[in-house]
Each structure stands twice: as structure tokens, then as C-alpha cells.
């Protein structure tokens, strides 16, 4: 008799951005969670659902002086929208290649807003079982000033969260880099 965990399709959400740490988190998730999110052809059971989420920060509306009057730019230039769409398409192309290489099907989702809030809202609305997010490895002082999406999600997401830290540099590659820079 199958256990409840084996019967349930797990919903895994991986938050992605353009950083290398984000792609490392995708690869880590594929390597370590493939058994719970990929389909099982031998048994006919469907796998879980993997969603790759990218959040666009909201457009900043600027105030421009024009002669004696001041006006706010409320519309977003078409060129800015086009560039954002192209960068997002490139991001998902790379992320989906990683998934295909590991034989895992994934869906993509793009939302807009403050990333930390939007990720936590998506987790709740989609009934996600596990959130996977990369960590930039900010120090304590930078994290205090800049904030940390992963830290915020760890405290506010309504599901378990897996924070994937960046890989450590090996001591030989660090020594080589130091020696080559002299």
C-alpha cells in the first residue's frame, strides 16, 4: 500500500532571477528533488508539479521637470517593456534547458511586484508544498541594508522553504585566482 507522500503530487516552486545563484538553485533542486517532481514512466504515476517563478519589480515612476511644470511619467516606454520581456525569455530558456537536461517538466510564471511579497503570495495561492530559492550569500551588514528575499521568505512563506546557498569555492581555485591576480 502506497503512503500518502507517494500518492500526493508535490507542488514545488523555484523562484528564479538572472543571478548565477538562482540557476545553481535550479540545478540543485533538479539533482536532489527529481524523484518527487518527475514522472515515473514505469508505474504510470504522474510526478509533481514544478513551477519556475520570476518576479519583475514594479516600474519606478519618475518625475520629470518640464519648463515651469513638473509631470510624472505614468506610462512605461515600449523599449523598456520589450527589453524586460527579452531578458525574461532568455532567463526561462536557460532555466528550462536545465530542467529538460534532468528530464523534468516545468511550467513558468511571471508576476510583477516586490519579489519577496509576490513569492510568498504565490506560495499561498498555489498551495505550494516546497519553495526553493537561491541565496546570494550577502553578509550580515549588506543583508541588513539591502534586505534578503530568501530571509524574508523563510519567515513569511506558508510552506517549507529550501534556501540553496552558493557553492563554496575550492581552496585550490581560490589560491589560483589569487596567484593569477598578482
Image (spheres, rainbow, N blue to C red):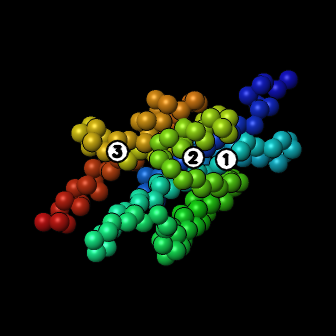
The quarter of the picture where the C terminus appears is bottom left
Which numbered disc covers residue 137? 3
Q: Residue 10 placed where, x, y %?
A: 70, 37
In the rendered view, would you say 56 is above or below 9?
below
Residue farthest to the front? 68
Residue name at image x 41 percent, y 60 percent: 61
Label 2 neighbour load within 10 Å: few <14, some 14-19, many 20+ = many
Label 1 neighbour load within 10 Å: few <14, some 14-19, many 20+ = many
Residue name at image x 34 percent, y 41 percent: 147
Report the Cα–Cα distance between label 2 and label 1.
7 Å
Secondary structure of residue under mark 1: strand
Residue name at image x 45 percent, y 59 percent: 59
Secondary structure of residue under mark 3: loop
The quarter of the picture where the N terminus appears is top right
Could you tell me if residue 164 is visible in this image?
Answer: no
Compare residues 135 and 182 and report the one nearer the observer: 135
Left or right of 159, for residue 42: right
- Of labels 3 and 1, earlier in sequence is 1
Residue indicated by mark 2: 14
Instruction: Please report contact status of discs 3 and 1: CB closer than 8 Å, yes or no.
Output: no
- Of labels 2 and 1, earlier in sequence is 2
Report the Cα–Cα distance between label 3 and label 1.
25 Å
Which numbered disc covers residue 50? 1
Q: Residue 166 placed where, x, y %?
A: 40, 47
Instruction: Please report contact status of discs 2 and 1: CB closer than 8 Å, yes or no.
Output: yes
Secondary structure of residue under mark 2: strand
Left or right of 24, for residue 50: right
Q: Residue 21 placed where, x, y %?
A: 43, 52
Amino acid at each position: 500500500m502506497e503512503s500518502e507522500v507517494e500518492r500526493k503530487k508535490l507542488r514545488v516552486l523555484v523562484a528564479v532571477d538572472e543571478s548565477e545563484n538562482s540557476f545553481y538553485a535550479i540545478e540543485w533542486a533538479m539533482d536532489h528533488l527529481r524523484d518527487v517532481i518527475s514522472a515515473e514512466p514505469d508505474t504510470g504515476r504522474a510526478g509533481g508539479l514544478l513551477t519556475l517563478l520570476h518576479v519583475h519589480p514594479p516600474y519606478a515612476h519618475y518625475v520629470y521637470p518640464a519648463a515651469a511644470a513638473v509631470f510624472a511619467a505614468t506610462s512605461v516606454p515600449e523599449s523598456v517593456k520589450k527589453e524586460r520581456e527579452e531578458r525574461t525569455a532568455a532567463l526561462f530558456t536557460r532555466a528550462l534547458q536545465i530542467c529538460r537536461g534532468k528530464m523534468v517538466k516545468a511550467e513558468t510564471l511571471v508576476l510583477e511586484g516586490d519579489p519577496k511579497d509576490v513569492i510568498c503570495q504565490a506560495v499561498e495561492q498555489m498551495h505550494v508544498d516546497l519553495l526553493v530559492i537561491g541565496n546570494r550569500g550577502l553578509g550580515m551588514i549588506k543583508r541588513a541594508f539591502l534586505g534578503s528575499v530568501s530571509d524574508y521568505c523563510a519567515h513569511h512563506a506558508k510552506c517549507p522553504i529550501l534556501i540553496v546557498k552558493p557553492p563554496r569555492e575550492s581552496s585550490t581555485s581560490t589560491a589560483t585566482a589569487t596567484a593569477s591576480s598578482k
